[in-house]
Amino acid sequence: MGNRKIFFSKKGSGYILGKKPLHLIIYLFFLTFTFLIFSFTITTEVGSTNTIPDNVETTVLISRFLNSPDCFAYQDEDTGRVYTGIIDLEKFNEATLEKCYFVDKDGPWAFKLTLESFDSNELSIKRTLKTSNWGARRFTQSSQYVIIRDKKNLYRGTLFITTQK
Amino acid sequence: MKKRGMSRSMFLAAEIVGAAIVAFLLISNALKWSDVETPYKAYLAKDMGLIIDSIFSSPGNIIINYTGNASDYVVDFNENSIAIKIDNDDGGIIKSFPGMKPNQIDLELEYPKKIKFAKIGDEIIIQDVVKKNLNTLKCDETKGESLKDKKILVDPGYEKDKIEPSKEMCDIANSFIFEITNAWVNYFNILSTRNLHEYGEDEGIISINCNDPSKSDKLSDAGVIISLRAGKNKDTTKNNIKAFIVSGSVKEKESRKLACLIINSILENKAFDNTKITGAPIVPIDLEVTDKDFPEGIKDKIFVMLEIGNSENDNGKELLEKVPELGDSISKGFMEYGK
């Protein structure tokens, strides 16, 4: 009873800003916070009930770069045959990457691809491409031996693949 | 006293309203996520997203029969995401995937009983039934030259080691001639390695005399040569449609495109849906080393030799019996090239 006197004017003409509205704000803030935590927990829980292992998804995505004629895989114009694992140097550029890995800025899985040739006497190359959603976040790195086709010649090379989730 | 009471009531009401709103949001959100179907929807979205990733990674044509059950949902595909929804008003569970610009997707399947994912050439197909043939070729997109005023030589061939002409091939050739002369090819421009029936000029029709075994020698004027042969493969599991072209010819590119369009036209013909065709390659041939029976003077002309079916195999024989359908398909491919 005593506390109430602090909150209301004696004439009863209205309320004085005091503890009660503050309690209300804290109360609403707490409820909102609870709501957010609750939603996040449930969303995470539901999402974790079925998960594709990261390496499965990245393996499939990386094979797009190496296998698809719309990405970097060499395709024989005469026969139409696609040579998986042979990178056509003419195609290894930003324009091809943008077409073959079309993703929003906040899209899943970003890649940085660095193609290097160690047939240094004949072909010296180090070319790096990044997908449009690449950012400065934590990443993992792997590499793969490839064959590089440049002007009808074949060279040994390595593709360094940096993956960012 | 009354006003003070009103103010207190206002606080109480605000608290109740606030609590009610938050409780409503919590409960509706909890209901949404705790719905037993939500994990399955999330599973379908992820699984189908992975299948689309796999299709984009495929070096060639591919058809995948999806084994998951999505018959209770609306499946909405966009260029780089997939949403599984209960109905069209439901926001659904969304899974993003990196798209591919030449193969963009934008379609919605409502309660599909079956789903097939396919990549045929540059086309991505997601439907309950995929009618496209896995052997379909990706043809050169450059425009072919007009064949309207070119002399067209039709060679129905002879069966090897026989003087008698092949009846089926001759009938297919006549069906082809009938179709193209009915469209836009002038019958004066038709030549053949066989003698032609003699019709009056005003009759406006032309056909090969299939009963006359003698060869014609009017080959040199031809700009385009279409040869037809029946396939004969000792491997009875094979029933192919092969298109032979001349390797190193100045018209190799044009010949390849014509061969590609003719093969695709045959594969797309619904009349052959129940006939198993095991392959449809384009084979470049070096004329100096081949043992194939090619007509003479083909080196630097637009030339396609079609080897159809397999006379050693039931499916192949069945294919060869479909004379008007084959003539129609070959003519469609031909006209698509030369229109």
Image: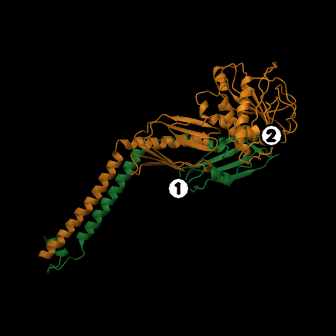
Residue assigned mark 2: B188
Asked which colour scheme the image uses, the reply is by chain
Mark 2 is surrounded, within 10 Å at the Cα level, by few (under 14), some (14 to 19) or many (20 or more) other residues, namely: some
Q: Which residue is situated farthest in the left direction here?
A: B1
- Res B238 quadrant in image: top right
The residue located at (71%, 49%) in the rendering is: A91
Q: Is residue B187 left or right of residue A85?
A: right
| Element under disc 2 | helix
Callout 2 amino acid: Phe
The chain letter for the residue carrying disc 2 is B
Identify the residue shown where x is 81% and y is 18%: B162
Can I make out residue B261 in this image?
no
Q: Residue at x 56, y 42 (%)?
A: B125
Q: Residue at x 36, y 54 (%)?
A: A37
Image colour assigned to chain B: orange
Give the distance between the C-alpha atoms of the residues marked 1 and 2, in whole angstroms: 64 Å
Chain shaded green: A
Note whether B201 is above or below A90 in the view shown: above
Percent of width and height locating residue A128: 68, 53
Answer yes or no: is residue B58 visible. Answer: yes
Q: Nearer the viewer, residue A34 or B26?
A: B26
Say few, some or many: other residues with alpha carbon within 10 Å of mark 1 (under 14 / 14 to 19 / 20 or more): few
Q: Which mark is residue A106?
A: 1
Could you say which disc has been placed on residue B130 in the image?
Answer: none
User: Which quadrant holds the N terminus of chain A?
Assistant: bottom left
Could you tell me residue B95's position as x and y percent? 48, 48
Q: Specify the amino acid type for callout 1.
A: Asp
Instruction: Give the image quarter of residue B282.
Output: top right
| Front-most of residues B30 and B146 | B146
